Amino acid sequence: MPVLERIYECARRRQMRFVPVVWAGRSSDRHVALARDAALQDGHGLALRVRILEVVPSVQLKWGGYLAPRVDDIVRAGIDVDLLIDLEYLKPDFELSAADLAPMLQDLIEAGPWRAVVLLGTSVPATMGSIREGTMGSLPRREWQLWLELGKCDLQRTPCFGDYAVQHPHPPQEGGGPGMRANIRYTCHGSTLIARGTGWVAQEGNAQYALLCKQLVDSGDFAGATYSWGDSLIDQCSRGVMEPGAQDMWRGAGTSHHIEFVTNQLRQRLIER
């Protein structure tokens, strides 16, 4: 049995309401067939992921022609299709404005009868080397600002917002890789706070996470112990109520806070409208 088919089977047993994803221009015919069969079996639709900054169709073909072979087959099968427009990692030195992005998005929006259109990306790098050891720094949430600016553009349809939480698009090495410093990532309105430890975490141990938690609690941006599961962990660890775990615990805590924070941001946008 193909690995992907096995994953779908396991997800069904756990009653996960998943949407299979295929990559425009990269997924094999076999991959597409497995995803299409899963979408037909479960009835939750299928998502088409487009790496918009990595794949650029010719001027004559445009996005509609580039996606047509995949989209037409899926739509003919009676499957609802979501479009995932993936910016992936937005490098600090890469200039991208909403005005530059809007024409490409419009072309993509017109390329198919999408159930949902989502724009996602992240400003979180693969490593935190830009933040000096033993300090607290911040990284601008460029993906959030870009999405806000797109709301002012004359688009036929404004995409939904998506991101990679507090993680780079490519998963980290097991255990964080050689030389990784302890760090906790904490999402704020326009930036991500980074509390970074000193020394290789494999040598220094997990004790320094207690200090990083205390720094976040005292930063003025801490949302409170009851805000999310992740905030509760940070609060308890800062007060010495619980022993600090390894990096995966704090990546989970940051993700928990991020999901709650961004959900509230989007909810507030709806209220303001």
Image (cartoon, rainbow, N blue to C red):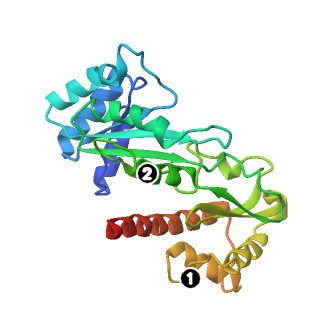
Q: Secondary structure at mark 2?
A: strand
- Residue 6 image position (x, y, % from top left): 36, 40
The reply, left or right, for residue 143 in relation to residue 201 is left
How crowded pointer 2 is (Cα within 10 Å; few <14, some 14-19, many 20+) is rated as: some
- Front position in the image: 174 or 76: 76
In the rendered view, would you say 35 is above or below 257?
Answer: above
Q: Which residue is mark 2?
A: 162
In the rendered view, would you say 104 is above or below 16?
Answer: above
Residue at (35% x, 24% y) in the render: 63
Q: Which residue is mark 1?
A: 224
Placement of the C terminus among the 4 image quadrants: bottom left
Q: Amino acid at mark 2?
A: Gly
Residue at (56% x, 78% y) in the render: 223
Residue at (34% x, 49% y) in the render: 10
Q: Is residue 145 visible?
A: yes
The reply, left or right, for residue 35 in relation to residue 166 is left
Placement of the N terminus among the 4 image quadrants: top left
- Front position in the image: 132 or 209: 132
Q: Amino acid at mark 1?
A: Gly
Q: Secondary structure at mark 1?
A: loop
- Front position in the image: 240 or 267: 267
How crowded pointer 1 is (Cα within 10 Å; few <14, some 14-19, many 20+) is rated as: few
